[in-house]
Amino acid sequence: MLSKRVVSCFDVRDGKLVKSVKFVNTKEIGEVVGRARQYYEDGLDELVMYDITASSDHRDIMLETVEAVASEIFIPFSVGGGIRSVEDATDLRWAGAEKINVNTAAVDRPELISEISHAVGAQSTILSIDVLRVPGGPLPSGFEIVTHGGRTHTGIDAIEWAREGERRGAGEIVVNSIDADGTCDGYDVELTRTVVDAVGIPVIASGGAGKPEHLYDVLTEGGADAALVASMVHYGEYTVSELKQYLHERGVKVRMHY
């Protein structure tokens, strides 16, 4: 059995680490490069970095920030935000990103997933989906894809979009619950499990982690291959090594850092 992964998410705006709740009230909480190195040294399995305003500002991602982080960490590094073409993906790869994370632009033009997958490989093509619960509506699953940092409703069923992303060549899916994002009340385990059951590629659960128990729940009951954490480590409530020790003691297979 493969080890479960603990992944951290860095939301970056203007080169600074920021955090929001349900994608609003975004606040600057620190600098990026030193924090990335700290988490790497503490046993983080993977880092995901989003340039959170690149898509909404219609600009390219900040390559200098990617280069600076990539020079300090030696674990898988996934980058997203403002990626609209194979050229953008290639630039990021040259800057040090191992994985290319697409979201809004892929919803606007699904062919982008296939194009990037063909260019850099499925294992390096990550589809990130921001999901909102819409119970009682027309969508079969009750989960809707939203874009532009949660500001744009698409009317797309999230589970069908996850399946299409896999068909088009995504090698992994990040499932971010807008309802849970930044709340520290726990992941949307039902959403995660539904996506896990619908696809045959690894799923990273995102949004809502506040306690070690939340990681355990989403990695076991939710079936996620990885749990993404942000607030609980950014604000110093837990360290990466503490989270992995907790999971290890609960019988979850993780890569321990000694």
Image: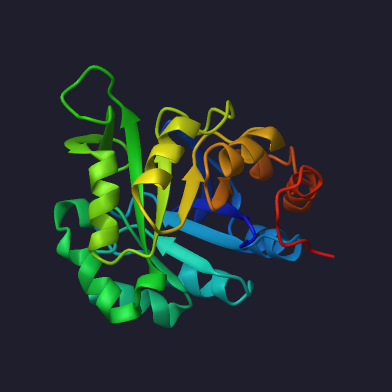
Q: Nearer the viewer, residue 157 or 176?
A: 157
Residue 249 x/y as whole percent: 81, 45
Counting every numbered tag in the picture gives 0
Tell me if residue 138 comes above or below residue 171 in the rendering: above
State which quarter of the image contains the C terminus.
Answer: bottom right
Tell me if residue 114 comes above or below residue 252 in the rendering: below
Residue depicted at x 69% and y 34%: 213
Residue 237 lies left or right of residue 129; in this view the side is right
Asked whether residue 85 appears in the rendered view, the answer is no
Residue depicted at x 43% and y 30%: 22
Residue 194 x/y as whole percent: 39, 38
Residue 234 x/y as whole percent: 65, 44
Q: Nearer the viewer, residue 131 or 202?
A: 202
Residue depicted at x 34% and y 41%: 130
**Rendered image coloring scheme:** rainbow
Instruction: Spot the residue most to the top.
Output: 136
Choose top left, top right, bottom left or bottom right for residue 85.
bottom left
Q: Nearer the viewer, residue 7 or 237?
A: 7
Choose top left, top right, bottom left or bottom right for residue 151.
top left
Residue 38 x/y as whole percent: 72, 60
Asked whether residue 237 appears in the rendered view, the answer is yes
Tell me if residue 25 comes above or below residue 164 in the rendering: above
State which quarter of the image contains the N terminus.
Answer: bottom right
Residue 254 lies left or right of residue 157; in this view the side is right
Tell me if residue 73 comes above or below residue 15 in the rendering: below
Residue 256 lies left or right of residue 205; in this view the side is right
Instruction: Spot the residue most to the right.
Output: 258
